[in-house]
Image: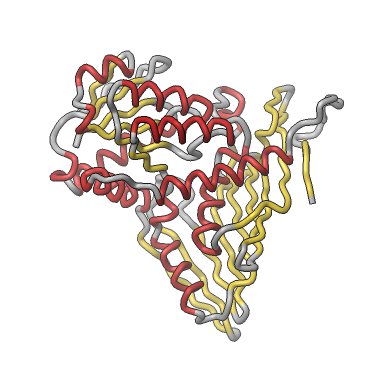
Amino acid sequence: MQSLVVGLGRAGAGLHLPVLAKARSCEPQLFGAQDVVACDPRRRPPHRPGLVTTPSIAAAAGALDPARTVVHVCTPPTDRHAVITELAELGFRNLIVEKPLASDADDLARIIRVRRKHRLHIEVVEPWLTSSLTGRLVGLTRSGLFGAPKSISIVQNKPRFRRSFAAPGHPTAFDVELPHGVALALRLAGAARVTHAVGTDLEVDGQFSPRMGGASIRLRHNSGVRTEISSDLTCPVRERRITIEFAHGSAVGHFAVSDDDDHSQLTLRANGRSEHQVLRDDSLTGWMIQAYRKFQAGGEQTRGFNFAAEVVQLLSVAKNICAEPVVPGPRPRTGHATVGHAG
């Protein structure tokens, strides 16, 4: 199958292109020998072997067979509906869309209508769901080895000053890391509702980016499990950690914090004993190969899309809770400040 990457920012050029190269070398019969095509009117990418660039989506469509092409939509969340609509009208049907699927519930409804009208097959990027670590955690929650899960804590921290100030492609901090955490929580503990949400602004040396300092959300799952997910985009260290407290033990997992390494770690504690494991976990490459296999198999795929839509709906509720007041107050002078919360 052929590949078209739309959007060459951090996600497109920094993640999808190198992961595609790795996946193509692992599964050449799945991807074929054609060059990858990419377009982004706002950026001119450096020359790469095996990459052909075009000035627009329409120009790319003229050089590709839409029926045999998988499109990677790597544009900011606020652009997703317009880009997906243009691709659908040009005949493309197989789409990989970066997380989150949409920026809010209204955009999600528009994308759902376009998907139904054009019978699109959309896979939303979620490598944590194919992670070796996630597989181990799912097995633990289902096995009953440590008893029933009681609570889940997910921490997703990293410094993100330059990108937040220079090119704020994400509307809020809820759209940066939390889609991974919410999806992971739903996979582990099932359907949930939002019980609490907090958002913070980002302000450093006179530069100000509303709602981009960090975010946290609490969920109450139908299963009774309680989850708290937090992300600090001003944190000096990178961390992607999950802690599950069971009735008779605990599990602490660390996902790889960047594309520099492909290993995760898991520590299990019970009855005064501790066991530590290091797992090979090239989850994004595995997720990409799995997605292309689904496209090759054909047929309508709804489960993954509906799951991604559920993540957007929960994040939309959280962002609505944290909406700024109608009458603006004085801008905080601290490094970052809470803009809203609900209990």
Q: Is residue 109 left or right of residue 294?
A: right
Query: In this rendering, does residue 12 appear at all?
Result: no
In percent of width and height, residue 168 lies at: 57, 26
Image position of 307 (left or right of 86): right
Which residue is depicted at the point 45% across and 22% down?
A: 82
Extreme-bottom residue of the structure:
271
Count of number-bearing discs? 0
User: Who's the residue at 54% across and 61% down the image?
Assistant: 190
Q: Is residue 29 visible?
A: yes
Residue 98, horizontal then vertical, whole percent:
43, 37
Q: Quadrant of residue 56?
A: top left
- The answer to which quarter of the image holds residue 61 is top left
Horizontal and vertical percent for residue 208? Answer: 71, 25
Q: Is residue 71 left or right of residue 97?
A: left
The residue sitting at 64% across, 71% down in the picture is 150
Q: How is the image coloured?
A: secondary structure
- Closest to the observer, 39 or 25: 39
Work out which quarter of the rendered image holds the N terminus and state it. Answer: top left
Q: Quadrant of the rendered structure where residue 318 is?
A: top right
Seen at 52% across and 35% down, the residue is 108
